[in-house]
Image (cartoon, coloured by chain):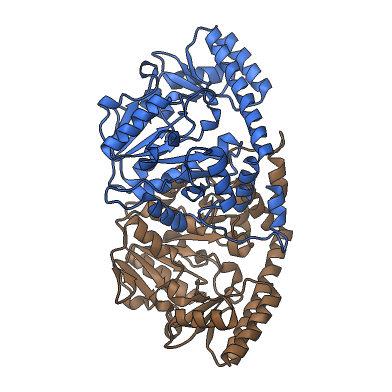
Chain colours: A brown, B blue
Amino acid sequence: MAQKALALSTDAGYTGYGDEQGNKDLREAIANVVYKDKGVKWDEVFISDGAQCDISRLQMLLGSGVTAAVQDPTFPAYVDSSIIVGQAGKFQEETGKFQNIVYMRCCPENDFFPDLATTPRTDVIFFCSPNNPTGAAASRTQLEQLVEFAKANGSIIVYDSAYASYISDESPRSIFEIPGAKEVAIEISSFSKFAGFTGVRLGWAVVPKELKYSNGFPVIKDFNRIVCTCFNGASNIAQAGGLASLSNDGYQALCRSIDFYHENADIIIDAFTSLGIKVYGGKNAPYAWVQFPGRSSWEVFDEILERAHVVTVPGAGFGPGGEGYIRVSAFGRRECMLEASRRLKSLLK
Amino acid sequence: MAQKALALSTDAGYTGYGDEQGNKDLREAIANVVYKDKGVKWDEVFISDGAQCDISRLQMLLGSGVTAAVQDPTFPAYVDSSIIVGQAGKFQEETGKFQNIVYMRCCPENDFFPDLATTPRTDVIFFCSPNNPTGAAASRTQLEQLVEFAKANGSIIVYDSAYASYISDESPRSIFEIPGAKEVAIEISSFSKFAGFTGVRLGWAVVPKELKYSNGFPVIKDFNRIVCTCFNGASNIAQAGGLASLSNDGYQALCRSIDFYHENADIIIDAFTSLGIKVYGGKNAPYAWVQFPGRSSWEVFDEILERAHVVTVPGAGFGPGGEGYIRVSAFGRRECMLEASRRLKSLLK
């Protein structure tokens, strides 16, 4: 990225606006490296300034007249953008939910995968896997069910794979590993967690050509229009960084970073587990999802913050289904993780 | 920017997500340098990834239920985003206009400023000054009329000042030079033309605290919500570049670049003028707006492209009012401008 920035100040290296969809070499690298053998073509990849921005661009495409389902708990941007674009109804104090949004409960009892037999049909299904905050990655069988469910209902899945690079078991790293998914799913993802690009702003969306509205019109054409009018390409410097991180050397370095964060997650999990506290996540995600049955997540957060000076995230921030949990991040220096572990053990034992 | 990119790879220099609204030091620099003595506070400045993206975020804020007016001709993103968000009606073949959009004709006969006495009231007025493509900068008196018009009608002005740094006469460089403008206007702007940041993606919006809906609710609160949910901040590397370009040394270097492009514009203007062709713009903008009365702008574009191998932009791309004109850019190397001038003179004389 430093080289690209310096090159911009030279006659030979200056580049103006690139393609709104992103530089072709980066689109190709994502198709070839991230989606190797998954059937994604380079011109189905749209480079973005991050998954959160793509969620809102998709909401702009979908408009206010659609119904949406979200996992509960999940990353709040799906519901928040649904409210802004006018899909959601009023907030219901008694349930902590917004009207017109279907909340698909994900909890240990259902292996963090929604019970599709009792889930109402919606036009759109936002599905984050590995899930933020629970850390649960859907299995192949579960994703096959999800694709089948969407196909039967004529729904579009917006699949958020921002944490896919943390998957360490056989769970699919992309919805496009599932046969038929290209007819029902859009995938959004990001360099933020995969390559430590938080704040650099780089991500992508895959909109397959096979995905069509019920009238046969390809969704990719509408998304391309949105990208060209409402966005104008990710920063050329960030894109240079994305390309470098998908080179052989870059990719191997990222894999080592991910291994490091997995070890951090193990430290967190061990700390809570040794105290008899149930922990989920960590294996396929940089987050541990720690259960405090019957307790308010804000109360647990406050107690840990004030008594151990360790910052966690109260689960209730991710939807009503996050109540009784806190999310603990593995993104940090090793000595911080070890110190946090020591403090948690002395606080909670 | 190179230094910031390198710093991100160090323990001391790594920064994660910044504030969604942008880094405070950059917001302060914009308030203090660009808006010196114009009464803009740093926390009314929202850093963005460019004016085009801010236009669409504003459209998301406004929604489909508002009416909009645009200059004709003007930068196409206002109308295009109005269509996407659902404000516009059908395209009318006979006029080249979309229903429900008010086109405010700007031409030599009205000094490129709309006749407000005959302009219908709309909820929003998109106003680009200096205008892309005509290069016309509205005078102080004209902008006072515009602010008065918006105030009388309860309209919001979205003022695009992306080319303000090219103003070389006494025309205001910001709508906020006009008393009372903070009650009716949002200003969007960009580093793209001012600092040569095309492709780096950096801009800003100023949403004054005084701007309120008819129910008294401040617009800035809604815009802040949109920025936090639908955007997540401009690239930290681009923001470092923005800050550098507003330092004393940076700002002086940019002023020299702008002078250089003004000289380029003079070369273009001289070429056409020497042939007896009427040229507007150039003085307060990096664009010359060249008039070919009664001719199709695409036909003129084709002829110049095919016979002189010089690329211009057909005026019709900026709305029906652009017919009969071409836009010629002054962004280029000096030897290219001189060569283009030679070819145009030999072609057209």
Res. B12 image quadrant = bottom right
Count of numbered circles on the image: 0
Q: Is residue A54 visible?
A: no
Q: Quick check: B67 above or below A35?
A: above
The image quadrant of residue B134 is top left
Residue at figure coordinates x 62%, y 41% from the top left: B246
Above or below: residue B187 compared with residue B61: above
Q: Is residue B40 left or right of residue A272?
A: left
User: Where does the image place residue B301, in percent across and percent down from the top left?
Assistant: 49, 21
Q: Position of residue B38 (x, y in %)?
A: 48, 38
Q: Residue B233, how many percent across, how many down? A: 53, 54
B288, above or below A122, in the image:
above
For the question of whether residue A301 can be seen, the reply is: yes
Q: Tell me which residue sits at (49%, 64%) in the image.
A: A160
Q: Nearer the viewer, residue A104 or A34?
A: A104
Residue closest to the eye, A285 or B93:
A285
Report whether A338 appears left or right of B69: right
User: Where residue B272 appears, x then y in whole percent?
Assistant: 54, 12
The front one of B84 and B51 is B51
Residue in front for this viewpoint, B162 or B305: B162
For the point 38% across and 51% down, the residue is A61
Residue A223 left/right relative to B156: right
* Quarter where residue A198 is shown: bottom right
Which image quarter is the C terminus of chain A in?
Answer: bottom right
